[in-house]
Image: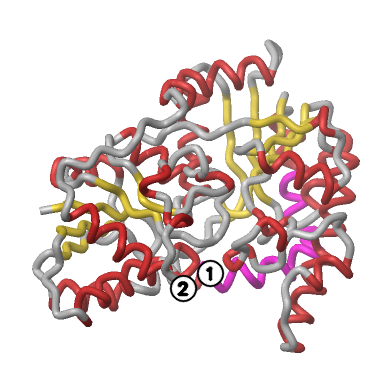
């Protein structure tokens, strides 16, 4: 029987609903599920997943687990489901799946374009919804147990931890030893927050002194609420700016890397770095810097440049006055952040090449200051 794996957040923006719809498509046709599905994750769709496990013995739910636990079930799987319709900045989950020898099934666009082969690309399916497209691919795969997808056009070694350290050394220079990584949230709650903890550990293994700043946020659903409210508080987050200024004075870092400042910190913590002699970098891993609701960003054409209020409002079509007010508020916060980034940052980092043009056109950043700095495989 065909083995399938899903690991990640059980949220609408990751299109876990597509997997649920696919399962329900088999139910509507009175068909037995022709696969075993192993699901690892947590989020708002947990209850629905649990209901499906009670109806189908072939669906196994393990909640959120570390990668070592997930590896124990890999031998039972042949493909990994990554059904997200929203545009991903980098295919970290897909890359991890490939490392586990599980070809991913998903939409081969933007950050995922190099990690999904044509045969497993949902974009080429003629059906309307993601659930229908998944149904079609999986039904075909279950009838072709000997099917082998084409090879990928990259080397996994490019995304190894060793390669990451070599790139970091080259970009940082010989004099960088002490580093502050600033991020809205620093505990292992979402993908990128987990990732920066791994970055810290990796750099410390190579002799760097690294400190993470700033806030430890509760897990869903409180954390999700805090994330949205933080965009408002970021308009004048002077308290956190003062704390960071003191930390910079105490540590005297050689490098300050801002991982994220949009969802809580805002422009003030960027401003206080002005008198520091440290190198300063900004990492763009979130398309929310360019689009009002990134979880609903499906097509590249939705991002309108340059970054103006007219473009920002028109990029998301809504007649809801509350949503329009929220978009205007986010725009004002991003304008303040944009000005500080333009003044303070030496280098801007993006995880995938397609983002260079977006950063350049949206924030009017010189292309020479934008570097592609891809993620590494989490092991």
Residue 257 quadrant: top right
Q: How many marks?
A: 2
- Residue lying at the far front in this picture: please name it: 126
Q: How was this image coloured?
A: secondary structure
Q: State which quadrant residue 42 falls in.
A: bottom left
In this view, the residue in front, 204 or 46, is 46
Q: Are marks 1 and 2 in contact (CB under 8 Å)?
A: yes
Q: What is the C-alpha distance between the residues marked 1 and 2?
A: 5 Å
Residue 240 shown in magenta = yes
Question: Which residue is depicted at the point 64% across and 44% down?
Answer: 259
Residue 133 vs residue 352: left or right?
Answer: left
Q: Main secondary structure of the magenta part?
A: helix
Instruction: Relative to 200, say whether 321 is above or below.
Output: below
On screen, residue 292 versus residue 101, left or right, reads: right
The x, y position of residue 51, in whole percent, is 21, 78
Q: Position of residue 220 (x, y in %)?
A: 45, 69
**Neighbour tally class for label 2: few under 14, some 14-19, many 20 plus, Cα within 10 Å:** few
Q: Residue at x 33, y 33 (%)?
A: 99
The correct choice, above or below, for 113 with respect to 366 in the image is: below
What residue would you read off at disc 1? 224
Residue that badge 2 annotates = 221
Horizontal and vertical percent position of residue 69? 22, 45
Vertically, is 4 above or below 319?
Answer: above
- Given residues 132 and 94, the one toward you in this image is 132
What is the quadrant of the C terminus in the image? top left
The residue range painted magenta reads: 223-244
Is label 1 in a helix, a strand or a loop? helix
Task: Give the crowd class for mark 1: few <14, some 14-19, many >=20 residues within 10 Å.
Answer: some
Residue 357 rendering spot, x and y as whole percentages: 76, 42
Q: Does any portion of residue 189 appear in the rendered image?
A: no
């Amino acid at each position: 029987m065909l083995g399938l794996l899903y690991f990640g957040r059980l949220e609408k923006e990751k299109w876990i609903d597509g997997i649920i719809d696919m399962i329900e498509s088999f139910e509507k046709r009175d068909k037995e599920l022709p696969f075993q599905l192993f699901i690892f994750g947590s989020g708002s769709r947990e209850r629905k997943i649990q209901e499906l496990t009670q109806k189908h013995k072939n669906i196994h739910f393990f909640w959120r687990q570390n990668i070592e636990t997930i590896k124990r079930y890999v031998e039972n799987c042949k493909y990994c489901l990554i059904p997200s319709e929203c545009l991903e900045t980098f295919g970290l989950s897909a890359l991890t799946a490939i490392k586990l020898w599980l070809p991913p099934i998903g939409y081969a666009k933007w950050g995922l374009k190099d990690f999904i082969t044509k045969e497993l690309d949902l974009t080429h399916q003629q059906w309307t919804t993601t659930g229908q497209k998944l149904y079609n691919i999986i039904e075909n795969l279950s009838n072709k147990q000997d099917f082998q997808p084409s090879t990928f056009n990259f080397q996994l070694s490019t995304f190894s931890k060793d390669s990451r350290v070599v790139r970091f050394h080259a970009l940082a220079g010989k004099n960088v030893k002490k580093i502050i990584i600033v991020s809205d949230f620093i505990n292992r709650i979402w993908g990128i927050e987990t990732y920066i903890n791994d970055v810290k550990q990796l750099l410390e293994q190579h002799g760097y002194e690294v400190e993470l700043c700033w806030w430890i946020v509760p897990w869903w659903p409180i954390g999700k609420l805090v994330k949205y409210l933080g965009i408002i508080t970021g308009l004048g987050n002077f308290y956190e700016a003062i704390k960071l200024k003191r930390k910079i004075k105490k540590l005297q870092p050689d490098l300050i890397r801002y991982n994220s400042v949009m969802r809580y910190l805002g422009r003030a913590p960027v401003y206080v770095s002005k008198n520091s002699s440290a190198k300063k970098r900004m990492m763009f891993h979130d398309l929310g810097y360019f689009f009002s609701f990134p979880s609903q960003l499906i097509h590249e054409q939705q991002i309108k440049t340059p970054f103006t209020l007219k473009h920002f409002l028109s990029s998301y079509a809504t007649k809801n006055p509350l949503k329009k007010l929220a978009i205007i508020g986010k725009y004002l916060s991003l304008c303040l952040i944009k000005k500080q980034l333009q003044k303070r940052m030496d280098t801007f980092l993006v995880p995938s090449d397609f983002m260079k043009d977006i950063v350049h056109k949206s924030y009017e950043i010189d292309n020479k200051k934008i570097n592609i700095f891809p993620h590494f495989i989490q092991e």
